[in-house]
Amino acid sequence: MQRHRQVAAAPQRRASETWDAIAELVVATLDRSPHIVASDVTAAMAAASTVGRVLVAGGHLDKHALVLVADPVYLNITTVSGVSATNLDEDLGPVPGGATSTDWTIHLPTPDPVGDAVRSAVSGVPHLSANEPPGESTSKSAMSEQASVLNLDALAQRAQERK
Amino acid sequence: MSPTSTSVSTYTRTQTATYLTDVVMGAIADILSDLKIDVTVLYRDWKQDEAAIAAWIEEGSLQQVVLECHQPNGTVAPIIEFPVAYTETGKGNATFTADRAALARYRAKLERVPSGTTYGLICTFRKARTPQTGWGPTTRASTDGLKSLKFGTLGSAPHAAVSMRYLH
């Protein structure tokens, strides 16, 4: 179930506040599942917060999505900065599908020059990954070649949802 | 004469401070990562430093943020300055811009530093400031003998802009 959520960053929120909003979105989505303990999700997002703030402040999450894979949920989260953030129509409500999720992984992007820091931060932390998320191999290949960062399938799905 | 209408967005000093703080903190994190300098303390103190810099920009007291790289042999270089220029009256309909692409290209030209180099963050002020947690008096390293290169404007917002200067 492809979804894409955009979170307003600066000037609406500081980097740390933006990360907190992202964490709340992930926790709220997975909290609907009886198989997932919310405190585990909170702990994982807290462990990632140090690099998460850096990804936000550097504008990296504007281009490189954080991906929550929790079948049937496949959620791309990006940030929006600048003037666009001031009039963004945010939807930070729980993403549908989380109620039936059992396993989950949060994939953090590893853009230069902070990729090593991200890999170090997630190393050994349950449910965090610095690897490419599974699936969507066609669009992922395109992303690599074009240095694009948005999941095009997710955007297409979002457009379909709005129709 | 046909009727016309205009739409002018107005932004607050808080938004300017929030935006420019992100630009500066993000640039510092990227530069230190590029130079392979340990960022553990930067990450640990992020919320505290972010809050301080934002408060000082919002009140207009911050003159510049200075990033000093302390090499194991005692040399302090490079030094990277982020001066803040204020628009006293504000530009209510100005926009928020950050030249991160240019910064990425610029970072590639930075001279490497030896392993074991550490860093220090220093703020200087143009007028009285509000005390902030974790920040106390210190002195800057000398910049005598260092060459200065101007990057230009790194980010701008309705009430202020921040530029960057590289001393090496």
Image: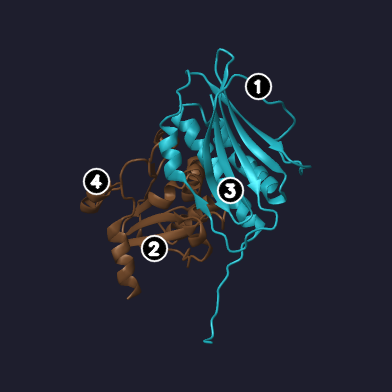
State the residue position of label 4.
A145
Decide if residue A125 is in sight here: no
Label 2 to label 3: alpha-carbon separation? 39 Å
| Element under disc 1 | loop
Q: Residue at x 53, y 36 (%)?
A: B28
Q: Mark 2 against mark 4, which lies toward the viewer?
A: 4
Q: Position of residue A161 (x, y in %)?
A: 33, 71
Label 2 to label 1: alpha-carbon separation? 59 Å
Label 4 amino acid?
A: Glu
Q: Residue at x 51, y 18 (%)?
A: B116
Label 1 amino acid?
A: Ser
Which chain is in brown here? A
Q: Is residue A62 left or right of residue B71?
A: left
Which chain is in cyan here? B
Label 2 to label 4: alpha-carbon separation? 35 Å
Circles 1 and 4 on the same subunit = no
Residue lying at the far right of the rendered structure: B128
Residue B20, labelled with which disc?
3
Label 2 amino acid?
A: Ala
Using the image, determine if residue A14 lies above or below residue B91: above
State the residue position of label 2.
A99
| Element under disc 2 | helix
Q: Position of residue A106 (x, y in %)?
A: 39, 48
State the residue position of label 1.
B142
The chain to which mark 4 is attached is: A
